[in-house]
Image (tube, coloured by chain):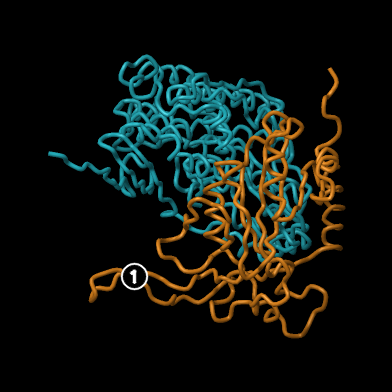
Chain colours: A cyan, B orange
């Protein structure tokens, strides 16, 4: 008797805990093996680029936070850099150090979330709890400078919104935090934000050690990641991969070193690269990146302590005057009114500026026709390029490896779908 | 060791491709415009030849030049009609489908912009390719040169309606299943054409014509010359203070 066996199609997502958002993956399966993967994206498409065309330049900065909502300030950075390039202005040194520092805080935030959820997907519960403990501390830094834990809206063309706070906000007594627990929480928060970061960064490498303790030598973790999703350097370049995806395959490419922006040329750090280009190597690369980010933050804190100064250009055509000036000076009042009602006009031209976001190269292609609104904004999202290679990479893998692959791509649908 | 490939990228491109590319270089960014017919040959050479080695295609995006340079606020003359001179407008977000601007004399509306990256030489190049026909914008697909361009071309097709000839799987990517129109075109209203809601009587989700009004409050303004010169002077002044 002969029996005809056919491949069957499986629908993964769009509401699946391991899909990291709204990914719908149509998988053609031969038993447990993937024959073809067809990711359907766009379920979170909000038309950010079109929305940006309808508003003055500054009003779109907040939208950038919501693209890759795990690396908020890095997205802002690319957009703000593009505007600054067209305007021909440059932020003061202190603002650039603050940006460098917060880009690295963002990188740690992103990687902590990544290791937590990636671990969770592959069956390592505990790591998630450890990673979120440190994430909370860094969220407090976001909140201290911008008032928001995630969607900071902190960078501006010409600098950053305001200087670092002199006093780190402290926890108040509550039914959840009291007594010794409260004392421990507030012990780092006695001084300024920089003091807090000093304490945090002194401690953080040991925390990375804790995560590594849980995973690096773990037999189950290695079984799930070693040799899975191997990407050769040629394949990575064919598919436009950047960031840890490219470095995991052994290509030493990091925009912070190769095409430095902000103050990356002034700080000392190393670029970790992988050897085999599998999920395990990318995991190791990202772990090391957290340590390197920690180093960069320490150097920035040191510089920022020693060098007070303006954090915003004093160019009223682009940056608003202070409230005090506004109330005393007619000229400042007019500038303030024009800036918030009409915005500023950016000279006609086009530019592409990219930053090394935690997930890879995040770029902003900006075209201006001289108006107070951009003519075209295109955001180059690293996740979009990475996910497009899904079909090629997972063919022949098992279903469970698809989950490992989604994790290692470090996908966030805010930036894939825009 | 001397540099085996002397000259700037623009010089090298000019020497290799001659009139095929029209080159501009601003602020360390090299931009080359080329005809759609030359696209495959030029990009293959850019990828493979050791002088260029643009191994990665970083990005491809569509762009619609309709209404480029149009404003809604007259900055040269001041009339007596006050603020109302600013609220009538044809720019992005201020019209619905019936009142959309018509492409009349806009030659070559659609273009694709390609960002290339050479990891070996650490430099970037931007290519502009215009579509010859505005009613049926069409370009050759680059999927045979860089596999990673696949989704970027699907995106440009979805949002701008640029058809990539030779693309293996040119489906919509970001918009909804069954979406009609190309939403990023400048004559597509910001509010869209349809909205979805749950109909309790039919007991299913239905599409209906959009019920919201276009509403963008800040008029599009172009100010050049005086303001910018003054801004530069003021910035220079304040730099001394800082």
Q: Quadrant of the N terminus of chain A?
A: top left
- Residue B17's image quarter? top right
Residue drawn 73% across and 75% down? B105
Residue drawn 73% across and 35% down? B123
Residue drawn 38% across and 76% down? B208
**Number of labelled discs?**
1
Residue drawn 85% across and 40% down? B15
Chain at numbered mark 1: B
Circle 1 SS class: strand
| Relative side of A238 to B124, left or right | left
Q: Which residue is most to the bottom?
A: B80
Foreground of the two, A353 or B234: A353
Foreground of the two, A377 or B160: B160
The answer, for residue A31, to whether it is visible in the render is yes
Query: Is A418 rendered above or below residue B176?
Result: above
Query: Is A62 rendered above or below residue A242?
Result: below
Q: Where is residue A257 shown, x and y percent of the image?
A: 67, 27
| Relative side of A177 to A111, left or right | left
Query: Is B214 rendered above or below residue A305?
Result: below
The answer, for residue A192, to whether it is visible in the render is no
- Residue B46's image quarter? top right
Q: Which residue is most to the left?
A: A1
| Relative side of A131 to A277, left or right | left
Q: Where is residue A401 shown, x and y percent of the image?
A: 35, 31
Return the residue at label 1.
B197
Q: Where is residue B77 shown, x and y percent of the image?
A: 82, 78
- Residue A329's image quarter? bottom right
Label 1 environment density (alpha carbons within 10 Å; few <14, some 14–19, many ≥20): few
Q: Where is residue B39 shown, x and y percent of the image?
A: 69, 50
């Amino acid at each position: 008797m002969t029996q005809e066996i056919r491949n069957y199609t499986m629908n993964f997502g769009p509401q699946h805990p391991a899909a990291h958002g709204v990914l719908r993956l149509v998988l053609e399966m031969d038993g447990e093996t993937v024959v073809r993967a067809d990711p359907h994206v766009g379920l979170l498409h909000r038309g950010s680029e079109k929305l940006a065309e309808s508003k003055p330049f500054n009003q779109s900065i907040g939208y950038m936070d919501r693209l890759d909502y795990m690396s908020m300030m890095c997205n802002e950075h690319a957009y703000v850099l593009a505007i600054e390039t067209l305007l021909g202005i440059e932020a003061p040194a202190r603002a650039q150090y603050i940006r460098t520092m917060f880009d690295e805080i963002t990188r740690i935030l992103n990687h902590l979330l990544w290791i937590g959820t990636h671990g969770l997907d592959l069956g390592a519960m505990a790591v998630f709890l450890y990673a979120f403990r440190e994430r909370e501390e860094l969220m407090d830094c976001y909140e201290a400078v911008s008032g928001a834990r995630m969607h900071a809206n902190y960078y501006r063309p010409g600098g950053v919104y305001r200087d670092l706070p002199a006093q780190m906000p402290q926890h108040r007594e509550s039914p959840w935090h009291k007594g010794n627990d409260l004392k421990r929480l507030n012990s780092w928060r006695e001084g300024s934000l920089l003091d807090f970061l000093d304490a945090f960064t002194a401690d953080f490498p040991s925390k990375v050690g804790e995560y590594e303790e849980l995973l690096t030598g773990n037999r189950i973790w290695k079984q799930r990641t070693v040799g899975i999703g191997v990407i050769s350097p040629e394949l990575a370049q064919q598919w436009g991969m950047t960031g840890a995806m490219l470095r995991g395959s052994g290509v030493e490419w990091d925009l912070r070193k190769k095409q430095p922006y902000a103050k990356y040329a002034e700080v000392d750090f190393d670029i970790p690269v992988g050897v085999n280009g599998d999920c395990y190597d990318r995991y190791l690369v990202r772990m090391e990146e957290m340590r390197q980010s920690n180093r960069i933050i320490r150097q920035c804190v040191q510089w920022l302590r020693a060098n007070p100064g303006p954090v915003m250009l004093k160019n009223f055509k682009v940056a608003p005057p202070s409230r005090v000036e506004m109330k005393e000076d007619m000229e400042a009042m007019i500038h303030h009114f024009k800036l918030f009602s009409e915005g500023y006009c950016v000279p006609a031209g086009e530019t592409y500026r990219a930053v090394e976001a935690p997930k890879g190269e995040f770029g902003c292609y900006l075209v201006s026709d001289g108006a107070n609104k951009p003519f075209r904004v295109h955001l180059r999202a690293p996740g979009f390029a990475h996910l497009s290679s899904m079909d090629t990479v997972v063919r022949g893998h098992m279903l469970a490896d698809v989950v490992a692959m989604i994790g290692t791509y470090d996908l966030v649908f805010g930036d894939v779908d825009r | 060791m001397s540099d085996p490939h002397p000259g700037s990228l623009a010089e090298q491109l000019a020497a290799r491709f001659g009139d095929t590319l029209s080159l501009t270089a601003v602020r360390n960014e090299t931009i080359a415009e080329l005809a759609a017919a030359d696209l495959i040959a030029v990009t293959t050479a850019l990828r493979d030849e050791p002088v260029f080695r643009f191994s990665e295609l970083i990005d491809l995006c569509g762009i619609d030049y309709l209404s480029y340079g149009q404003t809604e606020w007259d900055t040269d003359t001041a009339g007596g009609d006050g603020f109302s001179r600013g609220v009538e407008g044809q720019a992005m977000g201020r019209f619905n489908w019936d009142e959309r601007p018509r492409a009349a004399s806009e030659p070559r509306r659609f273009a694709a912009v390609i960002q290339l990256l050479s990891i070996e030489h650490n430099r970037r190049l931007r290519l502009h390719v215009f579509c010859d026909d505005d009613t049926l914008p069409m370009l050759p697909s680059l999927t045979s040169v860089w596999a990673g361009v696949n989704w970027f071309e699907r995106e440009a097709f979805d949002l701008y309606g640029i058809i990539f000839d030779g693309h293996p799987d040119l489906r919509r990517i970001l918009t909804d299943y069954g979406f009609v129109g190309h939403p990023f075109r400048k004559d597509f209203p910001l509010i869209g054409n349809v909205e979805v809601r749950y109909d309790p009587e039919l007991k299913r989700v239905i599409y209906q014509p959009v019920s919201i009004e276009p509403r963008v409050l800040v008029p599009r303004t172009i100010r050049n010359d005086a303001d910018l010169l003054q801004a530069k002077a003021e910035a220079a002044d304040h730099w001394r203070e800082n």
